[in-house]
Amino acid sequence: MIHDLCHCASSNNQQSGASSSGDDDAMSIHPEDLMQLQQETLNRFRVILTEEGLIRKRDDDNSLLRFLRARAFNIAKAKAMFEAMLEWRKEIGADTIKETFQFPERDAIKELYPHFHHKTDKMGRPVYIERLGQLQVDELLRVTTMDRMLLYHVKEWEILIDWKIPACSKKADTNISQTLTILDMKGVTMRHMSKQVRNFIQKITKVDQDFYPEYLGKMFIVNAPTAFKAMWAVVRPWLDKRTQKKIEVHGGNFSSKLLELVDSENLPAFLGGTCCCPGGCENADAGPWNESIHQKKQPYNEPPLKALDCPFN
């Protein structure tokens, strides 16, 4: 259970407060559609960041809105969050991580822990899927380390933001700024929630909440086993209340709910759709980001790892 919170962190539990928009789908609102008070706050926020030399080329209104919404449009708290994000990016090298961090074990990791983006939902948002019951933690740790997995997690964030979301926006001809996440719990047992995995989830949850806020549109947890109640009791306190409202938990009868949001041809067959990509949907990376009309330069440039028993510790 490694990347399962990749898109679900909206804001920090202790600091977020209630959103001024009061809408779980607030990020679908374009900046020009903001209420006047919120628009004025956004304008002031940009001026303050600009005057202090904190604004970057990539910081459009939607980017700034993520931090304002994560801090209930409190400029001081949003600014502190933004500054902490800039410092963290400098420390970890996030601005160049797509080019500088090589992760040749990527293909091997995806076999041991299936997680992938797959096409888009009816709103044009990229769909992110995990098959958590197939996670093999012990084997995964023979191939890589948790520290490298954390860097891989950040690299995947940067690829999503710089490559996949813009391609989705271009295809939908509208601003796409959130994702739909589906966590398939089929086969999950308590062994998937070892102490090491829980500690890692806490680390990436902090990264997501503090440095990549407000990217989740909706999350479906499906095929939830009885044991999930115990797992959810561990994970839920790490999430703020707004995020919790975006999460739906289902047992085995979930397909009709998913098909309300995702066209059948875009949903893998194992989730009740009709898509059967050659080689498996989990390996296809199908979506607007790989369609030539919307595609930018391919971000995955490292050769695959040839042997599963090559340790990186």
Image (spheres, grey):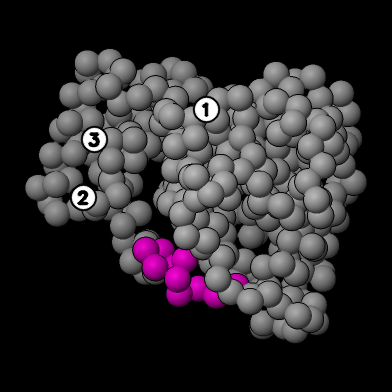
Label located before the other in sequence (2 or 3): 2
77 relative to 93, above or below: above
Instruction: Report the residue marked by disc 2.
Output: 55
Three-letter code, disc 1: Arg
Q: Residue at x 39, y 19 (%)?
A: 21
Instruction: Report the residue marked by disc 1.
Output: 242
Q: Residue at x 53, y 49 (%)?
A: 292
Question: Where does the C terminus fall, quadrant-wise?
Answer: bottom right
Along the horizontal axis of the image, is 223 left or right of 143? right
Return the x and y of residue 212 as percentages of the image width and height: 44, 47
Label located before the other in sequence (1 or 2): 2
Q: Is residue 238 visible?
A: no
Along the horizontal axis of the image, is 157 left or right of 308? left
Three-letter code, disc 3: Ile
Return the x and y of residue 94 as percentages of the image width and height: 41, 64
Q: Nearer the viewer, residue 269 or 186?
A: 269
Label 1 residue SS: helix
Q: What range of the chain is rendered magenta?
A: 94-103
Along the horizontal axis of the image, is 277 left or right of 152? right
What separation in Å lies between label 2 and label 3 (alpha carbons)?
15 Å
Label 3 residue SS: helix
Q: Residues within 10 Å of mark 3 (few under 14, many from 20)?
A: some
Q: Residue at x 55, y 25 (%)?
A: 123
What separation in Å lies between label 1 and label 3 (alpha carbons)?
19 Å
